[in-house]
Every structure is written in C-alpha cells, then in structure tokens.
Image (tube, rainbow, N blue to C red):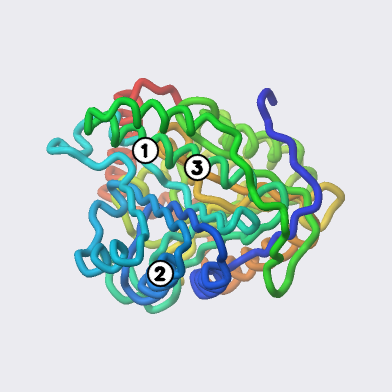
Amino acid sequence: MKNRPPLRDGHQIKLLKGGTEFFSELIRAMDAARSHIQLETYIFDFHGDGALVAAALERAGRRGLRVWVVVDGVGTPRLREEWRERFDKAGVVWRVYSPLGALGLLIPSRWRRLHRKLCVIDGHVAFCGGINILDDWYDPQHGALKAPRLDFAVCATGALVQQVQEAAMQLWWRIQAVRHVRQQNFPEAFSSFKAAGLHLPWLHDAQLAQGQTWVARAGLLLRDNVMNRGQIEKAYRRAIGMARHDILIANAYFLPGRKLRQALVHAAQRGVRVRLLLQGRYEYFMQYHAARPVYRQLLAAGVEIYEYSESFLHAKVAVIDAHHEHPWATVGSSNLDPFSLLLAREANVVVADGEFAKHLHAALAQAIDTGSDRIIPGSLLARSKFQRGMDWLAFGLMRLAIWLTGNRY
C-alpha cells in the first residue's frame, strides 16, 4: 500500500478497557505532568468521570503547565459557564473545532468533524482510542446506564508519542490560524500556519505506564481530508487480506464500503473465521438501520455477526490472528462507516504484538460470549416489513449523504 507508515519497535503499550481503566490512567498521567498536556476529544461531558478529568486539567493549569484542549463543534458545541470560568482562571486554553454556524449541519462541508481521541503529556506518554471524555455509566441522550459502555483505548510510550504530538500540534496551530484570519490578524495567522508545518521537538525520557505492558511494534494511523484520506481503511483491508486464521472486529457504527465488504467476504471464503461484534442497541436512526442491509451478503459468505446488547457498544477495534505467527491489532476512533472513513478526522493505533493481540482478543471474545446475540439469516427474514423498510430507508439516506459530499464509497 502506498504511503503506509511503517510500524516501529520498542513501544510500551497498555490496553485500557472502558472508562474506568482509561480515566484512571489518564488522570494519573496528567497529575504527574511537568510541562504540557494536549487533549483532543469529540465529546467532553462534565458528568461523573468527565468532571474528574476536567479537574485534573485544572490542576495542571494551576501548576503552570501549558494545557490545550480541542473539542468538536458538534460533539461539544459549548463549554459550561462554571468550567469556562475555572479553566480561564487556571490558564487552560479551550478551542472548538469547526463550530456550527446558523445553518448547522445543513451544509455538507460541515459534516467533516474532529472525531479522534488523542492526548499527549510532556511529549513522552500518549493516549489514543475510542473513549470520549464521558462517564461510562451515563449517556447525554439516555441518562444513567445499567451497564458501562464497551470501548477501548491504549496508553503508549515510544516513537508513537512523537507522531501523536505532531498530529495534535499541527491541528492546534491550524485552528489558531483560522481564528486569527477571522479576527483579520493576518501576521499571526501566517505564523500559525507556518508553525503547523514544523517538525516539533519532543522529550525523549520515557515514562512507562503502570501495570501490564508489552514491548511492541506500533504506529499511528490518521484519517483526514488532505494527506491521509484512505490510510485507516487501507490498513484494515491489507490486514484482512493477510489474515490466515481469525478476524475479530468490534465496531459501533458499521457500514463498510464495497472493497472492505469484499475483503471480509473473501477472507471467510478462504477459511478464515470472521466475527463481527456490532451495535445491538438503538442509538441513532441512520447508523442503527443502515447497517442491516449489508448483513445478508456477509452472512451468506460465512461471516459471524453478533450484536452487543449488554450496553452501548462504542468500540472501534480489531484483532487478527492473535494466537498465530503474525498478529495484528488496532484500537482507535474510526468506525467502519462512511462518516469516519470519508469525512472525519480519525486516529487509530496499530500494534503488531502477540501479547497485546491476545489480551484484546480475550476481551472481545468475552463480550461476545456474555453480552451479545448472534444474528442468523432467519432472524433477518423475521423482521417486520416496517423494520426492513426503515433499514432500506436509512441505507438510501446514507448513500444520498455520501453523494452530496462528492465522495464515492
């Protein structure tokens, strides 16, 4: 694959399951920070654990650290007044990526969102995954949850941290440049655009995550609308094409394009066990219903499909050949749907390490065994005409949305 970034050796990678593990590790690293914290997230909610993360950022700012936070204009359109005052007093700088104007999402170009979840601390420890700054037991639309969301992140040291820091810094300075242009401060805008293109220094002293770690080969995959339009999808297709034994994918919003569907079908046809763990709870009309018309083709090829019903599935992870010679795993923010793969800024970590892959495989296998329902062809046929009509309506609207953006999928 052209432009595929190489994986580098020598990383310490820790898999974090759910908000309980992620927020604990993140806050610990923030409280140990000595220089700077850069955080990007789609949603920053100040309920429960989200408030604990916000307090850690506030403490870091009061210690004199440089603290920069970027959130998405759809996921987090505004900062609560209480926290705005607290952040301002602490020196925490908060920016909103692509705020919505008067017409909101009626303009297709505004569908390009910041969906990645990244944090880099002191240039020597980084976090990447699918977990928003949002309490696992709470949902802004549904209230308190009976079970925590299923999601994952990683904590990493090594060369991967430099990649995360450069990605975060480039986005920050681009946001600053746009801000200066709107203020008609063109000298500052030029300086910010120039800074966005710099290769930025980082600190080389390693601060290893506490607990279970692995020395692993790893790399950061980015998806944007400039240099990295197809990087994440191509990595998935290449890994699926090289699979020889087992593919296990967990994805919250699943509507793969033709090439990715064919890769899964071909893998199943050559004898690879392919399992998909998908969203089983109704969350959003488009994402819930549009996925079902593609089930039939995959099931006919021998792909096993499971819907997670214990709570909301928010994971965007995959693991391939975990117990064999060439293990491959990815943890990140990218769904396998057109909004992630064609429009959003996304970030995934790829790890080629047997112990890491086995750990992730075991967590997903447990979720399938204890919290999921298997989908069989008969259950699809048993759906009412109304339900099937909603499926095809959502699928058609999704295709229309892709066409409006000028993309092919």
Query: On the picture, is 208 further left or further right than 255?
Result: right
In the rendered image, which quarter contains the N terminus? top right
The disc label shown at residue 175, or none: 1
The disc label shown at residue 169, or none: 3
Residue 273 is at least partly visible in this image: no
Q: Earlier in the sequence, mark 1 or mark 2?
A: 2
Gap between marks 3 and 1, in whole Å? Answer: 10 Å
Q: Earlier in the sequence, mark 3 or mark 1?
A: 3
Label 2 sits on a secondary structure element that is helix
At 27% from the left edge and 30% from the top edge, which residue is drawn? 185
Q: Earlier in the sequence, mark 3 or mark 2?
A: 2
Q: Amino acid at mark 3?
A: Met
x then y, percent, for residue 117: 48, 53
Task: Name the foreground residue: 13 vs 338.
Answer: 13
Task: Name the foreground residue: 175 vs 379.
Answer: 175
Q: Amino acid at mark 2?
A: Arg
Gap between marks 1 and 2, in whole Å? Answer: 24 Å
Find residue 354 and report its image quarter. Answer: bottom right
Residue extending farthest bottom: 146
The disc label shown at residue 62, or none: 2
Find residue 360 and report its image quarter. Answer: bottom right
